[in-house]
Image (tube, grey):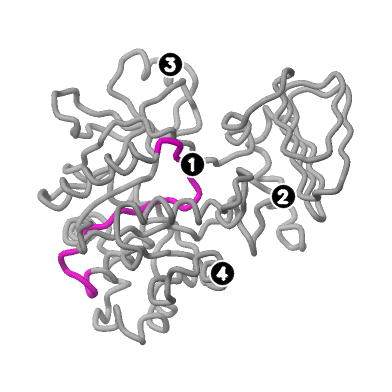
């Protein structure tokens, strides 16, 4: 392992599309969504230790989750946790991480990984990420892992790349989430991958990119660069971080850069962003139901996702098809699968209650 290589795990989101299981005080990255005895962030951390030393792993998260992080990841120290005082999307998150690492190790090359993704083919992931690290170390390059599409999915952004013999492709353009017809055309044409939000770059490369395309963010954060990687950092970040604008790193940096590359790969990836993505990942019974409850009785029911967080509760259902049924401690959700994108909006209507 290279001591100049780091991984920063982004773990500050709320996971609102996984409501009611995912809540403000314990979002989905801290839940054992898959029922494997590990939360999503624990799985991501364990994967990361196969690529970099565990002391080179940072967790970038909201200040609300410091205790949860330390409880679920006892292997790390408080110095490895970067706490955001406000939710300003991924661009300020990346800039903060880069400035922290620049003060710690100017030769650092780091990957930004979401904390809540599922990767089934870990050996391939390790191979591809190490290749990305080496390329980003030797070149002034922004590298991303691009997921080879298996279906014309309309829920992901796409990356269009130039064909060629090299396994590391030049990115031509980032595409927003398409409609079904456009997604089908992407697959037929070839040269398109899903944007998984996995990025690798050196601190020098990404800071230069911010200075070129989003200098207001780095300017706000680096009014006093001496505060990074020292005991005063948290108090300083609490003051300046909320001054940054809320924007994704895709919009702020990637869409303006001319040095972006992608490694097309199949790592058994899912962003696990919705209940339907969990349905797709899970094993199903003869009627295509996903039953994630210990005590369940179904009759004349098909293509449902049913999960209870009460181990001793019996759930009986008859005559229902294509529903999401989630029985949490204080919320019972019964929702059509085809309308699941509305769950996020529904959750927001309860924002002033204990149910979020």
Judge the density around disc 1: few (<14), some (14-19), many (≥20) Cα neighbours within 10 Å: many
Q: Residue at x 42, y 84 (%)?
A: 235
Q: Is residue 313 left or right of residue 240?
A: right
Instruction: Provide the residue span drawn in magenta.
Output: 102-121
Residue that numbered label 3 is attached to = 184
Q: Which residue sits furthest bottom?
A: 232
- The C terminus appears in which quarter of the rendering? bottom right
332 in relation to 266, above or below: below
Q: Is residue 36 above or below residue 180?
A: below
* Front-most of residues 83 and 314: 314
For mark 2, what is the residue?
20
The picture quadrant where one finds residue 264 is top left
> Marks 4 and 1, Cα distance to the nearest angstrom?
21 Å
Decide whether residue 64 is among the magenta residues: no
55 or 269: nearer the eye? 55
Residue labelled with disc 1? 118
Q: Element at badge 2?
A: loop
Neighbour tally class for label 3: few under 14, some 14-19, many 20 plus, Cα within 10 Å? some
* Residue with the mark numbered 4: 71
Q: What residue lies at 31% left-to-right and 39% top-to-bottom?
A: 145
Q: Position of residue 227 (x, y in %)?
A: 29, 83
Residue 271: percent from left, percent from top: 49, 40
Which of discs 3 and 2 lies nearer the camera? The answer is 2
């Amino acid at each position: 392992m290279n001591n100049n290589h780091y991984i920063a795990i982004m773990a500050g989101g709320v996971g609102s599309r996984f409501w009611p299981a995912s809540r403000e005080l314990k979002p989905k990255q801290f839940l054992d969504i898959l029922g494997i005895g590990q939360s999503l962030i624990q799985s991501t951390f364990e994967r990361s230790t196969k690529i970099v030393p565990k002391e080179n792993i940072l967790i970038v998260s909201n200040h609300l989750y410091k205790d949860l992080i330390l409880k679920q990841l006892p292997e790390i120290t408080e110095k490895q946790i970067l706490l955001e005082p406000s939710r300003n999307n991924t661009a300020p998150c990346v800039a903060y991480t880069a400035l922290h690492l620049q003060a710690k190790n100017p030769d650092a090359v780091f990957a930004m990984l979401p904390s809540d993704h599922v990767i089934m083919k870990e050996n391939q992931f390790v191979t591809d990420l190490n290749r990305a690290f080496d390329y980003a170390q030797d070149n002034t390059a922004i590298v991303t892992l691009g997921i080879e599409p298996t279906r014309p999915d309309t829920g992901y952004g796409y990356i269009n790349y130039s064909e060629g013999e090299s396994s590391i492709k030049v990115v031509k353009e980032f595409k927003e989430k398409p409609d079904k017809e456009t997604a089908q055309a992407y697959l037929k044409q070839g040269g398109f991958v899903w944007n998984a939000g996995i990025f690798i770059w050196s601190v020098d490369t990404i800071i230069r990119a911010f200075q070129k395309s989003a200098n207001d963010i780095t300017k706000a954060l680096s009014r006093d660069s001496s505060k990074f990687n020292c005991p005063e950092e948290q108090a300083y970040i609490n003051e300046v971080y909320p001054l940054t604008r809320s924007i994704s790193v895709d919009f702020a940096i990637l869409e303006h850069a001319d040095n972006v590359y992608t490694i097309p790969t199949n790592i058994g990836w899912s962003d696990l962003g919705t209940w339907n993505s969990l349905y797709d990942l899970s094993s199903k019974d003869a009627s295509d139901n996903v039953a994630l409850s210990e005590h369940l009785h179904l009759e004349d029911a098909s293509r449902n996702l049913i999960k209870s967080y009460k181990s001793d509760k019996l759930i009986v259902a008859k005559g229902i098809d294509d529903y999401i049924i989630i029985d949490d401690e204080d919320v019972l959700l019964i929702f059509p699968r085809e309308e699941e994108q509305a769950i996020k909006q529904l959750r927001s209507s309860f924002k002033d209650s204990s149910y979020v």
